[in-house]
Image (cartoon, rainbow, N blue to C red):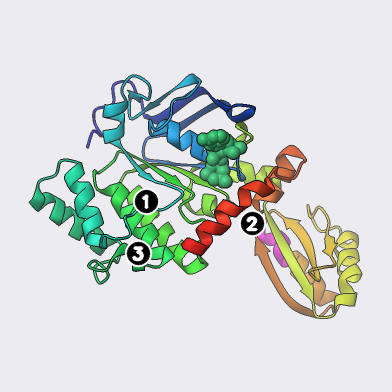
Amino acid sequence: MKQNDIPDGGGTAVQVRGLVKHYGETKALDGVDLDVREGTVLGVLGPNGAGKTTLVRILSTLIRPDAGSARVAGYDVLTQPRQLRRAIGLTGQYASVDEKLSGFENLYMIGRLLDLSRKDARRRADDLLERFSLTEAAKRPAGQYSGGMRRRLDLAASMIGHPAVLYLDEPTTGLDPRTRNEVWTEVQGMVREGATVLLTTQYMEEAEQLADELTVIDRGRVIAGGGIDELKAKVGGRTLQIRPADRSELPRVVGAVAQAGLDGVAGATADEAEGVVNVPIVSDHQLTSVVGLMAERGIALAGINTHLPSLDEVFLAITGQKTSTAAEDTPADTLQEISA
Ligand SMILES: Nc1ncnc2c1ncn2[C@@H]1O[C@H](COP(=O)(O)OP(=O)(O)OP(=O)(O)O)[C@@H](O)[C@H]1O
Ligand SMILES: [Mg+2]
């Protein structure tokens, strides 16, 4: 809509400086700086209560910061909220579709609210329903949609006004893996078409799939940032998980990896409860060497897999501490999962 009308963006679609928001003793945001370059995806990774939704709310002009400044698509959150709101799309953490209205009606209504003519609103709704594979369900009340369908409808709704900047607040929390993949595909499509995206997530894997750069926040502060690869290098790349056919072989697996001194393999730790040995690896070459070593030593395997570090592992590597995920924050997610 306003894509070319960026007074002083200079290629920066979102610019945040020293943002502070306190709720009593709680420092939801405690001096956050970040930039999102036009046409890129910034992943904001953080555990429950880190301040992600607070950040998105401020950048959507839904709440005011206590201090600091932010510009989105060239507009100031404090002094130009109306222009700013026209330049953004928001998919909130909790789906905001009207359950009584059909998928079509939800989108049509938003189009009308955005001042589209009846004809244009209808056309836009039809286009988006098709694009998000909801044409068949278009006439059913959104209340009957599955969690994934609702998310897709929510994404479609945030696209109606052709926003220059999209905020996706934990777009896949509570979704099953297949539905999560569907949402990722849609988001990738939006980015290919030039959208700038600020994505909050608790999943390293989601960040890897979608984000160009990452900012890690915890307790309202930025604790790390940079490219995905930089961050992965910092936290040690992937973890190779080896499951010996016989659990009693766990120490032998650990010993074999330790003794072999394979190039750059830092070591191995047994997870007795899971019956696996975890080996941090940074290259495919190391993966091949470690697996080859098992064959060489005649250790029978029931399975191997590699996984990206979890948020917990990322935090552990960056801060030397476990995430501060507060137990009291969990029920909301659980509820959401049930309702999704
Ligand atoms: N309206 C509010 N009143 C009081 N405290 C709040 C309010 N909104 C947020 N907080 C607190 O501010 C902190 C940051 O909350 P926020 O919702 O931004 O976290 P989040 O990173 O989005 O977490 P989650 O992953 O659980 O969605 C939390 O400690 C939260 O309890
Ligand atoms: Mg949140």
Amino acid identity at mark 3: Gly
Q: Nearer the viewer, mark 2 or mark 3?
A: 3
Image side of residue 333 versus residue 65, left or right? right
Residue at 49% across / 19% down in the picture? 68
Q: Which mark is residue 308?
A: 2
**Measuring 81% from the left and 73% from the top, which residue is drawn there?**
294
Q: How far across and down, in percent of the image, does residue 299 sit?
A: 84, 78
Q: Is residue 137 visible?
A: yes
Q: Residue at x 68, y 42 (%)?
A: 234
Which of 293/149 is in front? 149
Q: Which residue is mark 3?
A: 143
The stretch of residues the image draws in magenta is 283-288
| Count of all numbered marks drawn on residues in the image | 3
Q: Which residue is mark 1?
A: 96
- Taking 306 as reference, is 47 above or below it? above
User: Image quarter for residue 47?
Assistant: top right
Cα gap from disc 2 to disc 3, whole angstroms? 35 Å
Of callouts 2 and 3, the N-terminal one: 3
Question: Of the residues shown, which amino acid type is indicated by label 2?
Answer: Leu
Q: Amino acid at mark 1?
A: Ser
* Location of residue 217 in the rendering, given as x and y in whole percent from the top left corner: 60, 37
**The N terminus: image quadrant:** top left
**Residue 203 can be seen in this image:** no
The mark nearer the N terminus, 3 or 1, is: 1
Binning the other alpha carbons within 10 Å of mark 2 as few (below 14), some (14 to 19) or many (20 upward) gives some
